[in-house]
Amino acid sequence: MFKLKKILEVSVLAGLKQKESFKRFGLSIPKGVLLYRPPGCAKTTIAKCLATAANMTFIATSDSLVGRRGLGRSSNAGDVQLRILSTLLTEMDGIIPATCENAHIIVVAATNRPDMVDDALMRPPL
């Protein structure tokens, strides 16, 4: 747990608190973080703590939202899942930096099945 805390402090929180130092070294604040481990190992708690430490809003969802496309699901479930994934990707693409330099949006996701996360959600930001 200590190692994870240190990684998040250096890669996320330090970038938010010391923007000029990050720029000087050619570093950028990550646009997203994916936490993955087996169920019950405090992924959501870590995400909440990260949001609190960064003074950001935390929005949790407890039901699975999207999965990997094309896994041979039944037609209705696959159609719904594809529409949800498309909507989520559209919304994420629509997130543009605010005019204020101090505003940052970081997406933090947690899963126990990283193999089920669609590749489009893992793509680098534009």
Image (cartoon, rainbow, N blue to C red):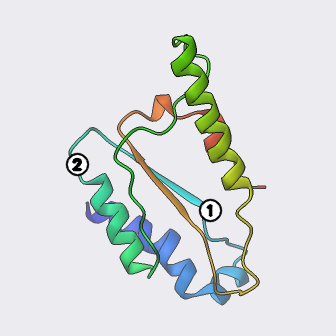
* Apparent side of residue 66 relative to residue 9 in the rendered image (left or right): right
Q: Earlier in the sequence, mark 1 or mark 2?
A: 1
Can you give x and y, in whole percent of width and height, for residue 99 in the image? Answer: 76, 83
Can you give x and y, in whole percent of width and height, for residue 26 in the image? Answer: 73, 74
Q: Quadrant of the C terminus?
A: bottom right
Q: Quadrant of residue 57?
A: bottom left
Can you give x and y, in whole percent of width and height, for residue 13 in the image? Answer: 48, 77
Which amino acid, mark 1? Lys
Which amino acid, mark 2? Cys
Q: Is residue 13 above or below residue 110?
A: below
Judging from the image, what secondary structure is the residue with disc 1 in?
loop
Q: In percent of the image, x 37 and y 62: which residue is there?
A: 47
Judging from the image, what secondary structure is the residue with disc 2 in?
loop
Please tell me which residue lies in front, 19 or 60.
60
Q: Tell me the distance, in whole angstroms, between the alpha carbons under discs 1 and 2.
A: 24 Å
Q: Which mark is residue 41?
A: 2
Q: Quadrant of the N terminus?
A: bottom left
Q: Residues within 10 Å of mark 2 (few under 14, many from 20)?
A: few
Can you give x and y, in whole percent of width and height, for residue 10 in the image? Answer: 47, 73
Q: Which mark is residue 31?
A: 1
